[in-house]
Amino acid sequence: MGWDVVPADVRRWSSGLAELHERFVYRFNRLEPRESSLAYMRGLIAPLERKNGWTLAEEAGHAAPDRMQRLLNRIDWDADEVLSDVRDYVFEHLGDPEAVLIVDDTGFLKKGVRSAGVQRQYSGTAGRTENCQIGVFLAYATERGRTLVDRALYLPKSWTEDRERCRKAGIDDTVEFATKLQMAEAMVDQAIADKVPFRWLTGDEAYGQSKSWRHRLEEADVFHVMATRCNDTVVTRRRLDHRVDELIASLPRQKWKRRSCGAGAHGPRVYDWARAEVRPWHREDRRHWVLARRSLTRPGEIAYYIAYAPAEATLDDLVQVAGARWAIEECFQSAKQECGLDDYQVRRYPGWHRHITLAMAAHACLTVLRAAELEAGKAETDPPASSP
């Protein structure tokens, strides 16, 4: 996303946050958390070098961080209810039946052993094993904008098998171990139950390699383009358990097409793409494909996807959905840089969800405001309609 922050922007964003805040202010039963929650979000979008309890308190004009800390740790309010209101705001302004849902996780580097869910574990953010927390997220991407719409903190077994440790971190005894995949499945199930307007789902191979989830998505008729491993197997007319890399390697050269899968930081993301139809026994109006993406600079570097799509879906359609996965990485980056997603000093499980929810609300607001600005600019430059 990436905005150059100027005072006029902050004032406009602050006004937009106040409008969003009105949607969920009733979730707080006292004046202090109502005021503190708005001040907290305004601090998150302010041009501060660090966005912790002290700096947010100073930005709000408080003498100490006590009110901000109470908001996250002690005052009674339901972050899931607030998130529901934020999601309604997102779908009202960005909702699109052609939208793409994206699942992924991101790491939050931490020190010590008391923060809920922390342990030494692999962080894709750091690209290595670190002492960190992992959050699983769901993003919503349309042509007008993209933002995060669901979240949950991953709790390793080292936590869920130690209930006393969990209680000290505010984790209820009813919260059981769930894999990141199971958490992502629950988020998508909730989006389906809530009738969220979307057409496609995508995710990296950590989620897409699950055949059982892909089967469930197909049963629910959820179109998807999910990354998978090179040794994943599919069914073709010729054989069972055909490896996807071998299937793609058998394609003639003319099956490969050069396509952009969307804009990147340095221009269009261009690769060579090919697809092969699989699972020939299916509904007449549905198709199954193996999709492959080959690097232009490193031809031996090929990524693979499994797609379930409408029969009329073209190669370009599948390419665009596969490319949409980067939208969630952009959300993580902008939410951390612009909205303090990873700037928190809470250790307890409820506090994590509260901070993350308010940061997601701030990010959603900026996304909606930015979409409106772009549309207003486009309207100003569009030529007037000719008279009949």
Image: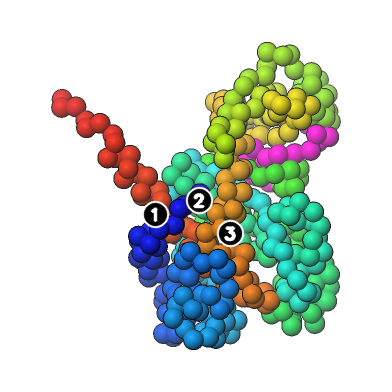
Q: CA distance from mark 3 to mark 2?
A: 11 Å
Q: Is residue 377 left or right of residue 68?
A: left
Q: Which residue is mark 1?
A: 369
Q: Specify how the rendered protein is coloured.
A: rainbow
Q: Amino acid at mark 3?
A: Lys
Q: Tell me if residue 374 can be seen.
A: yes
Q: Residues within 10 Å of mark 1 (few under 14, many from 20)?
A: some
The numbered mark, 3 or 2, whose residue comes first in the sequence reads 2
Q: Position of residue 74 (x, y in %)?
A: 58, 85
Question: Which numbered dot is residue 125?
Answer: none
Secondary structure category for the residue under label 3: helix
Residue found at the very far left of the displayed protein: 387
Q: Amino acid at mark 1?
A: Leu
Q: Is residue 80 left or right of residue 33?
A: right
**Residues at badges 3 and 2 in contact (C-beta under 8 Å)?**
no
| Quadrant of res 284 | top right
